[in-house]
């Protein structure tokens, strides 16, 4: 590595880097751009210049590191997303390339007009995404083909619509999901208890589950963490006041299908109760289960969830006066030991206006309107997506 003399400023170091890059001396350019970044670490443009030098050197890892640093400064940096997509595509990292191209295309759609130099790059990205969805569609179709004859007409219609919808090939009018949408399911705000005959069994263990939570909170260690943890560079949003704060805290027992064994070991009654629930099992995605703690005078803003293929169960454990919960047009008060189930893709919010902690056990299960065949279809779809290599990293 070339070590240039310290420049007078980031501007001067950047000038020297550009000159070296133009002269074909990529290593010297990287050294100068590195000095510029050190002098002004919050400049995404300098990080992109450094990435360009590392690309010229042929150092993929450092190029991607500089691009990630640029995106940590501003997640809306379309140039960084395009270059990141190009590099992942060149490395045949399909899922990462699909995610980066999707981000770049979404940002490009907000530009009026699109700058001419970007148009051919975004056109290439759109072609890549189209090819990826073709591959995903073929993989998913093949995965579910053996079960079509056993499905009812309604199941086939909904299942096939789910696949094309998940791949962005069809528009639906539905509740708001931040992830995948399963079409034509009823948009229930709160589901009828009759769908969940096992609710009474878990309600009967409320006292024991609460005792395990209180013992856990006496010495939580790393188990207790902020529920909201935004990525660096994310613009301010409704979540900013809760970002990395324990005002809304969580202790996870399961997260995206992965067991948090230290917490499960400390909460054996809760672990057994969850194991008895006929919930979704999707590797890398479900189930999730956690103790949700809302500190006094804290509000969770109106928002919507990831996918309507699941239902969300609340078992209230500690509920002081002044707490409430709204889903769509219906507001309910939590009552300790009385569980309910709702569709979190309908706008909902929660609040604790009391002077004490509110605690609820939250976990996900299948949407009760999905048939056994459709649940199998979903599991096969995600397995096919993962096997194809085009599953976007969480």
Image (cartoon, grey):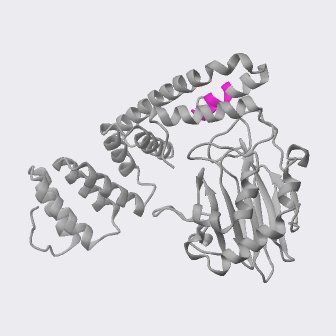
The spot of residue 128 in percent (x, y) is 41, 32
- Is residue 66 at least partly visible in the picture? yes
Q: Nearer the viewer, residue 6 or 18?
A: 6
Q: State which quarter of the image contains the N terminus.
A: bottom left
Q: What count of labels does the image hold?
A: 0
The spot of residue 125 in percent (x, y) is 41, 35
Q: Is residue 165 magenta?
A: yes
Q: Which residues are magenta?
A: 160-168
Side of 157 where 166 appears, left or right? left
Q: State which quadrant residue 137 falls in.
A: top right
Please tell me whether residue 135 is drawn above or below residue 325 in the rendered image. Answer: above
Side of 352 where 85 appears, left or right? left
Side of 227 where 153 appears, left or right? right
The spot of residue 186 in percent (x, y) is 82, 38
Please tell me whether residue 150 is drawn above or below residue 331 in the rendered image. Answer: above
Outermost residue toward the top in this view: 149
Q: Residue at x 65, y 50 (%)?
A: 287
Q: Residue at x 12, y 51 (%)?
A: 22
Q: State which quadrant residue 224 falls in.
A: bottom right
Q: Is residue 315 magenta?
A: no
The spot of residue 350 in percent (x, y) is 77, 65
Q: Residue at x 25, y 71 (%)?
A: 38
Please tell me whether residue 344 is drawn above or below residue 369 in the rendered image. Answer: below
- Is residue 351 at least partly visible in the picture? no
């Amino acid at each position: 590595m070339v070590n240039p003399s310290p420049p007078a400023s980031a501007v001067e170091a950047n000038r020297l880097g550009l000159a070296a890059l133009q002269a074909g001396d990529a290593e010297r350019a990287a050294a100068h751009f590195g000095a510029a970044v050190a002098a002004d670490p919050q400049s995404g443009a300098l990080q992109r210049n450094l990435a360009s030098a590392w690309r010229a050197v042929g150092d993929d890892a450092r190029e991607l590191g500089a691009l990630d640093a640029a995106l940590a400064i501003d997640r809306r940096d379309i140039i960084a997303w395009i270059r990141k997509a190009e590099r992942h595509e060149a490395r045949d990292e399909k899922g990462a390339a699909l995610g980066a191209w999707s981000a770049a295309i979404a940002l490009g759609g907000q530009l009026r007009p699109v700058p001419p130099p970007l148009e051919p790059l975004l056109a290439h990205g759109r072609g890549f995404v189209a090819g990826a969805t073709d591959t995903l569609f073929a993989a998913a179709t093949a995965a579910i083909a053996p079960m079509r004859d056993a499905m009812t007409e309604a199941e086939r219609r909904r299942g096939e619509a789910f696949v094309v919808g998940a791949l962005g090939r069809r528009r639906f009018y539905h509740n708001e999901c931040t992830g995948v949408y399963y079409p034509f399911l009823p948009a229930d705000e709160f589901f009828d208890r009759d769908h969940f005959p096992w609710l009474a069994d878990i309600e009967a263990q409320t006292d024991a589950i609460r005792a395990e939570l209180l013992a856990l909170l006496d010495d939580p260690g790393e188990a207790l963490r902020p529920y909201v943890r935004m990525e660096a560079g994310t613009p301010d949003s409704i979540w900013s006041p809760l970002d990395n704060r324990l005002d809304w805290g969580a202790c996870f027992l399961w997260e995206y299908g992965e067991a948090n064994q230290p917490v499960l070991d400390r909460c054996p009654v809760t672990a057994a109760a969850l194991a008895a629930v006929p919930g979704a099992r999707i590797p890398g995605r479900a189930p999730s289960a956690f103790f949700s703690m809302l500190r006094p005078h804290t509000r969770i803003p109106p928002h919507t969830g990831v996918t309507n293929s699941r239902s969300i169960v609340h078992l209230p454990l500690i509920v002081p006066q002044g707490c409430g919960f709204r889903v769509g047009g219906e507001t309910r008060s939590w009552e300790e030991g009385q569980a309910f189930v709702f569709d979190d893709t309908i706008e909902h919010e929660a609040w604790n206006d009391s002077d004490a902690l509110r605690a609820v056990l939250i976990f996900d299960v299948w949407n009760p309107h999905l048939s056994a065949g459709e649940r199998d279809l979903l599991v096969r779809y995600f397995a096919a997506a993962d096997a194809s290599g085009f599953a976007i990293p969480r």
